[in-house]
């Protein structure tokens, strides 16, 4: 992936994250609005925004008190968000471990909205996911940058380059990620 594609993904993620319910009223988020507007005004953004606009809809969703209220929604390009999460984990891996993730390793990124499906497909091993998330919350080494981004991570006891990560944006867990040797994961 080239830097131009990275920049498009970054802009798209910024657009999605600044329009989520949890970001509303956040001062740091409000400072990003001019950058989101510049993205929306660029000619190269038209295709991405058309897909977003075409997916706009509305429906009744429960609010914080449990009342159903009418709200707008849009379909998110999960592949762009996943690519961003993988890149963030690679950067955090370097920050925490002091070296790049080896080439034979891969970053697996699971958005929190897909966790129920992952657990369902895990069959008898579904408790594993709850265990990992609980461990990341209880024992993970957590770092936060203001109220915008935080992460926690755990080292696998079996492999010095196998790790688990929990990424949060605006106080909400968005991703569970792991780094694994591709050959070992294929077994």
Image (tube, rainbow, N blue to C red):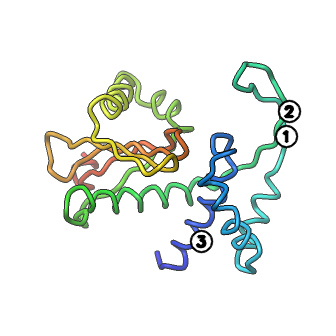
Q: In this view, does 81 lie to the left or right of 186?
A: right
Q: Which residue shows up at 41% across the image and 24% down it?
A: 123
Circles 1 and 3, Cβ within 8 Å, touching? The answer is: no
**Residue to which mark 2 is pinned:** 70
Which residue is nearer to you in this view: 102 or 70?
A: 70
Picture mark count: 3
User: What kind of element bears circle 1?
Assistant: strand
**Residue to which mark 3 is pinned:** 8
Circles 1 and 2, Cβ within 8 Å, touching? The answer is: yes
Find residue 58 and report its horizontal and vertical position in percent. Answer: 85, 40
Find residue 40 and report its horizontal and vertical position in percent. Answer: 74, 70
Which residue in the rendered view is the most extreme toward the front? 27
How many C-alpha atoms fall within 10 Å of the one at disc 3: few (<14), some, or many (≥20)?
A: some
Circles 3 and 2, Cβ within 8 Å, touching? The answer is: no
**Residue to which mark 1 is pinned:** 58
Q: Is residue 89 left or right of residue 116?
A: left
Q: Which mark's residue is nearer the viewer, 1 or 2?
A: 2
Q: Alpha-carbon distance for marks 3 and 2?
A: 31 Å
Q: Mark 2 or mark 3, which is nearer the start of the sequence?
A: 3
């Amino acid at each position: 992936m080239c830097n131009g594609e990275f920049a498009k993904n970054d802009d798209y993620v910024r657009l999605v994250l600044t329009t989520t319910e949890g970001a509303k009223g956040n001062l740091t988020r409000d400072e990003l609005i001019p950058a989101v507007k510049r993205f929306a005004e660029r000619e190269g953004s038209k295709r991405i925004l058309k897909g977003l606009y075409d997916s706009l809809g509305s429906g009744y969703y429960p609010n914080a008190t449990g009342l159903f209220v009418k709200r707008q929604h849009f379909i998110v390009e999960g592949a762009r968000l996943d690519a961003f999460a993988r890149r963030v984990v690679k950067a955090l891996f370097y920050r925490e471990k002091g070296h790049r993730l080896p080439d034979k390793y891969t970053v697996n990124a699971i958005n929190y909205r897909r966790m129920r499906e992952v657990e369902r497909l895990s069959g008898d091993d579904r408790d594993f996911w709850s265990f990992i998330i609980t461990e990341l919350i209880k024992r993970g080494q957590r770092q936060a940058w203001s109220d915008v981004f935080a992460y926690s991570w755990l080292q696998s006891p079996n492999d010095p380059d196998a790790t688990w990560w929990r990424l949060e944006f605006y106080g909400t867990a968005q991703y569970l990620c792991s780094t694994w040797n591709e050959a070992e994961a294929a077994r």
